[in-house]
Amino acid sequence: MNDAQIHLALNHFPILGTLFGTVILGFGVFKKNKSLLDTGLIILFLMTLITIPVYISGEGAEEIVEELGVEHEIIHEHQEIAESAVWFMDGLGLLALISFFFTRQTLNGPGRLLTIVTFVLGLIVIGLMFRVGGSGGEIRHTEIREASQ
């Protein structure tokens, strides 16, 4: 597999996984359900790990699609959005991991506050990831590009 194939095979996981993980975490926070909390936090951490090969393979994918005649500006815009989203995603994954360990004993106190902050950051990351996905879709789908202008 080349970088473009890896990028395309994995790029939907961080987007959809962050959405599902955050929704599950939200239910866990508001229902004070430990199983849902743990599930949401683990999903968010795993999505952070999956984001790494997606991001790394993006550089090689860029070279491949530029050879196919895709404008560098469109790719560069996607890359810029992805770079900021990756930083937020890394923060989310780290916060999810910390929250997971803080809630091992109790759902109250600092663990509860951390899970609420993780949930809010998850909502922000969902928006960023959807922007990344949208800009990535514009690279090869001209119908999306034309509709957004």
Image: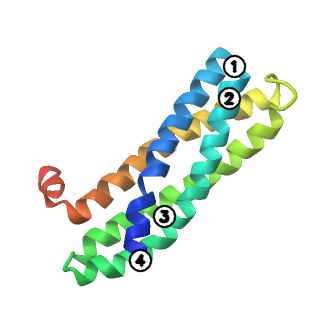
Does 5 sit left or right of 90 as displayed? Answer: left
Q: Nearer the viewer, mark 2 or mark 4?
A: 4
Q: Where 101 falls versus 88 (above or below)?
A: above
User: Mark 2 or mark 4, which has the lower sequence index?
Assistant: 4
**Mark sitting on residue 33:** 1
Q: Which residue is mark 3?
A: 54
Q: 9 or 92, which lies in front?
A: 9
Name the residue at 61% across, 57% down. 49
Q: Which residue is mark 2?
A: 37
Q: Type of residue at label 4? A: Asn
For the residues marked 3 and 4, what is the alpha-carbon distance in whole angstroms? 12 Å
Q: CB atoms at circles 2 and 1 under 8 Å apart? A: yes
Q: CB atoms at circles 2 and 4 under 8 Å apart? A: no
Q: Type of residue at label 1? A: Asn
Name the residue at 56% across, 57% down. 50
Q: Secondary structure at mark 1?
A: loop
Q: 121 or 6, which lies in front?
A: 6
User: Mark 3 or mark 2, which has the lower sequence index?
Assistant: 2
Q: Quadrant of the N terminus?
A: bottom left
Does 147 sit left or right of 17 as displayed? Answer: left
Residue 26 at x, y percent in the picture: 58, 26
Q: Nearer the viewer, mark 1 or mark 4?
A: 4
Q: Which residue is mark 4?
A: 2
For the residues marked 3 and 2, what is the alpha-carbon distance in whole angstroms? 26 Å
User: Mark 3 or mark 1, which has the lower sequence index?
Assistant: 1
For the residues marked 1 and 4, what is the alpha-carbon distance in whole angstroms? 42 Å
Does 108 sit left or right of 10 as displayed? Answer: right
For the residues marked 2 and 1, what is the alpha-carbon distance in whole angstroms? 6 Å
Residue 109 at x, y percent in the picture: 82, 25
